[in-house]
Image: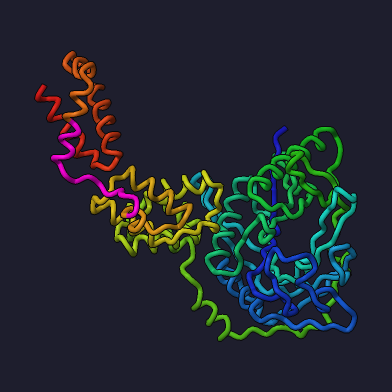
Amino acid sequence: MEFLTTMGLEVHCELSTKTKIFCSCSTEFGGEPNTHVCEVCTGMPGSLPMLNEQVVEYAIRTGLATNCTITQYNKFDRKNYFYPDLPKAYQVSQLYMPICQNGHIDIEVNGVKKAIRIKEIHMEEDAGKLIHDPWDDCSLVDYNRCGVPLLEIVSEPDFESGDEVIAYLTKLKSILQYIDVSDCKMEQGSLRADVNLSVRPVGQTELGTRTEMKNINSFKAIARAIEGERKRQIEVITDGKKVVQETRRWDDNKGSSFAMRSKENAQDYRYFPEPDLVPIEISDEWIEKVKNGLPELPTAKKERYIAEYGLPEYDVDIITGSKYLVKIFEKATEICGEPKEVSNWIMGEVLRMASETSTEFEDIKFNPDSLGKLIVILKNKVINRNTAKEVFEKVFTDDIDPEKYIKENGLEMVTDNGAVEAIVKAVIEANPKAVAEFKGGSAKVKGFIIGQCMKQLKGKADPGTVNKIVAEELEKL
């Protein structure tokens, strides 16, 4: 029996405001436990919240960037539940009037384009964090994250494969980074996804019973969780049992999920209007101001790069998929005026070094101007390409100035053809066996001689020049 998979996503995005949503506590990641807290975010009796205006603006910005309609009269609701990391025993969220509705993000998977509908985006506050201490076999609570502003971006159940989910999350992450509302560092919990998944036999129109897997914080884990839960549900159905609607936790180390609790609905949370916050009225002027301040978004940038620079679509997809690669591309191109060469360096050396050093694009530290300078230096034949690659490694890891580094380390190319010719003659004279093989018709000897010459020249000669002089000297034999 064949099965169809249907999924919807709830993406939680921590906003990069300096202070929390309802108080002036810092949102900085990594502080000592329970040091970024106050009476408001820990829910002390008598404390009252005050809405951070920048959170609203970031929500409007996100809604416009994802083709949503902005709800100009919206309000907050109180979501009640008891959990150790929620000291107030309720979370301020938006159930009835979310700030953004009815948007979409366009994705492309295996050449097929598809619009993923966004049901709503709402503002809410984050909860704290439970940390299990294996030494004392207990769980400790860090309330620093309580009150950190969140946007929850809720899709419609439009996903049919893990590839579509990853394409959507990749596009959404790049949009959020482009518009500067979040750093989206998944390893720090800035971007987390809940996956609602159901399966049904081919031919059945009614959707199957769904489960929800909570707070998965890496793309690879999300892909594995989808495949694992899909297989589990199919096994349950083929065994003649029924899938239970529940919340499950994906354990990426074990490669399986386990039940956490039965799936709640809105009634279980006893939602009611938040009594301590007034409704929000968003004017046409405010929306227009935010719209005019939006940067060029990934899709528009991709189209421009292809039209303006004639770059391959694959290269452009990679570059425009990251705000940080775009910064490198644009600054380096501004310096050297060679967009195709910059693109080649990004697709080659930048991606290679990022992979080898396990560096996320957002954590790349080198000055983009340095890549532009290096390309100019290479174009002017101050160094050869192999040396340029070695210099770039130092640029990437140590953020050095390439011009200064090349001069200090004597890496300039040998441009004296007479000096090169002398080395070539010396190498030929020192390798009579190779010369004999060349005379006997062995073409590969030329490559050996060139290699030995480059070694003697410490890689600081133009390979084309060395090749030419070696060919000339060998012909004389």
Asked whether 412 falls inside the magenta stretch, the response is yes
Q: Is residue 430 left or right of residue 130?
A: left
Q: From the image, which quarter does the N terminus lie in?
A: top right
Magenta stretch bounds: 408-424
Quadrant of the rendered image containing residue 8 = bottom right
Q: Nearer the viewer, residue 406 or 199?
A: 406
**Is residue 293 shown left or right of residue 371?**
right
Observer able to see residue 120? no
Q: Quadrant of residue 97?
A: bottom right
- x, y percentage for residue 224? 68, 42
Give left or right: position of 389 versus 262: left
Residue 159 location (% of width, % of height) = 64, 51
Identify whether 168 is placed above or below 458: below
Q: How is the image coloured?
A: rainbow
For image coordinates 30% across by 57% down, the residue present is 338
Residue 460 in view here = yes
Q: Residue at x 61, y 66 (%)?
A: 182
Give me the residue at 76% from left, 46% from top. 250
Task: Please say if 200 is above or below 149.
Answer: above
> 195 or 148, which lies in front?
148
The x, y position of residue 76, in whole percent, is: 77, 77
Quarter of the picture holding the C terminus:
top left
244 or 202: nearer the eye? 244
Which residue is at 26% across, 22% downward?
444
Q: Image height check: is 185 above or below 209?
A: below
